[in-house]
Image (spheres, rainbow, N blue to C red):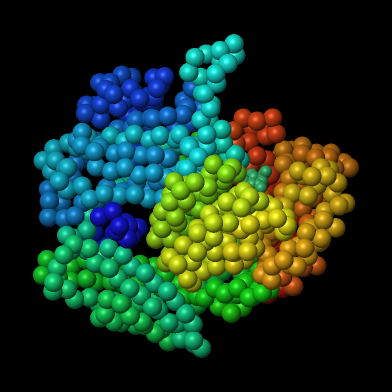
Amino acid sequence: AAASGMLYPRFSETRTIIEINGMWKFRADMSPTRNEGFLKKWYTQPLSQTGDVIPMPVPASYNDITQDRKLRDFIGWVWYETEFFVPVEWQQKRVVLRFDSAHYNTMVWVNSKEVLSHVGGHLPFEVQLNSSLDINGVNRLTVAVNNTLTPSTLPPGTIHYMKDTNRYPAGYFVQDISFDFFNYAGIHRSVKLYTTPIFFIDDITIVTDVKGSDGIVDYSIIGGGSSNDTTIVVEVLDADGIPVATSIKQNGQMIIRNVNLWWPFGMSKKPTAYMYTLKVVLKSSAGRDVYRQPFGVRTVKVTSTQLLINNKPFYCHGVPKHEDSDIRGKGLDYALIAKDFNLLKWLGATCIRTSHYPYAEEIMDQCDQQGIAVIDESPGVGITSVHNFGNASLTHHLEVMNEMVRRDKNRPAVIIWSVANEPLVTVPQAEHYFKSVIMHTKNLDPTRPVTFVAAVGPNGDYATKYVDILCINRYFAWYSDCGHTELIQKQVEYDMNKWREHHNIPIIVTEYGADTVAGLHQSPSFVFTEEYQVEFLSEYHAAFDKMRKKFLVGEMVWNFADFMTKEDITRVVGNRKGLFTRQRQPKMSAHLLKKRYESIMNET
Ligand code: GCB
């Protein structure tokens, strides 16, 4: 079951889903070793019998829910518990328990029995439950989640024990992180129980191509459970549900005549972001299973100067984001998702980067459906030390890429894989590490360009030679020459032309931005004011315009919205480089970008 396809749970005539989200019981293990829960086996009894419990929403980060600073900044194991029942009819089915994500290290017990564990904060994990279920009564679900980061987790972190007893109490420790966002933790996405028949559709892979007016659909289907008398019917349904191609093979190719292509928002008049469905019906003497996999028909190619979607040059003008908001932290929230997509549309954005970890599948669905192209980034952020290049780190990074590509491979919106953000690449160890991760990802998916996002210059770096497209983050007149907006154009141009001398591939500026406290004004402009942000961004735009039609294929302002970081003297209650506040209200800069993105869109 471990190597399954883990298709997103979807209702069908043969499948049922129950979300077990809601108010769960919760308790943090505040013991000095953080290990009392394991020593006393909290999973063998109701959590409320082990000590005081509080109500905790699932999904949500636990950090900002209470008034307790100790819980906000907690490092170690926290314990969650809920109860559920399953209908008797489920005895005949395969019953799966799925976590869409939990941060970071998770262990799960059902009725005191360990059923599942997973390492990694941003990707789903699941297990078939049948043998541990009580079909005639209440089932107790206990979940322990640990947010401790180590040199080999993604993102990495380090625990420091403070030895100076004049300054710190005995056993005092802190977690050092070198990534710039709050290490929110808990059960961040939905928890589901779902059923499939015993013999079931386990995985679907779809790769598309375009020939003239035909859409080419290469597909393969993997069945789970054993059976020797299977038959299969695979149909392509158009957006109205009408079959446009059919096959009875488990692997093969189908042709869609007069295909409607998937285009990013703004690239075609109509229809944009056209989605088809691959309807799979798998039959055996044991019964049948039905699954409907959405997909789009489009191609992605990179030339030495262009990023092509359906063989047309695509200019990626958009924003990197964060999963971040008041109270819920990184917890999934449908209202927030809908609002963010309305803001992206309002802005005229055509693409996002999932900085700096894979986002919820519900967000990715909106990208597919609304035509927002995605640079899909792994949690490889904060790889800033040679201690992050060991075997354990590399093995885990490859595994994360497996999980991420498996999850997002069928999404037309995903046009680029990013394996890391701003890693250390100026040491020789970086070469083997990033060559391995990039080659591995290209093997998993030969159809999409692979990159990592670079913060370095073109000299003395051991890894950018392996990327298909260059993504660079730049902070001229912010982290260097602070305040000197008059230098921006010169420095951007010099930098990009240097890169081009070393690499004959297109460039996307994946970050540029300035911290801006909404409502702070000063004229002439001064750092942290709205005037400064507008002036700063405008200078970059003037530079970009000189390179846009040449080799620059994208520009993305850091960041979509303000977001929380750890406490630090360089951050005024979080990172303030958003076009929008954390509450999603526009700063002056959002209006500037709206005008720019709309006018770029009208050129095409
Ligand atoms: C970066 C990082 C991003 C930070 C940003 C900043 O280069 O990629 O995670 O938040 O700079 O504002 O410093």
Please say if 570 is above or below 444: above
- Report the side of 181 relative to 239 (left or right): right
Q: Is residue 589 left or right of residue 12?
A: right
User: Residue 413 appears at what percent x and percent y?
Assistant: 51, 65
Q: Which quadrant of the structure image shows residue 315?
A: bottom right
The one of 237 and 549 positioned closer to us in this rendering: 549
Residue 55 shows up from this direction? no
Farthest residue in the front direction?
A: 428
Point 25% across, 55% down: residue: 1
Quadrant of the snapshot with the C terminus: bottom right
Q: Is residue 528 above or below residue 36?
A: below
| Residue nearest the observer in this picture, 424 or 523 | 424
Residue appearing at x 35%, y 25% in the figure? 35
Residue 520 lies, in percent from the top left, at 77, 37
Q: Residue at x 46, y 62 (%)?
A: 440
In the image: residue 393, left or right of residue 264: left
- Left or right: residue 534 versus residue 415 is right
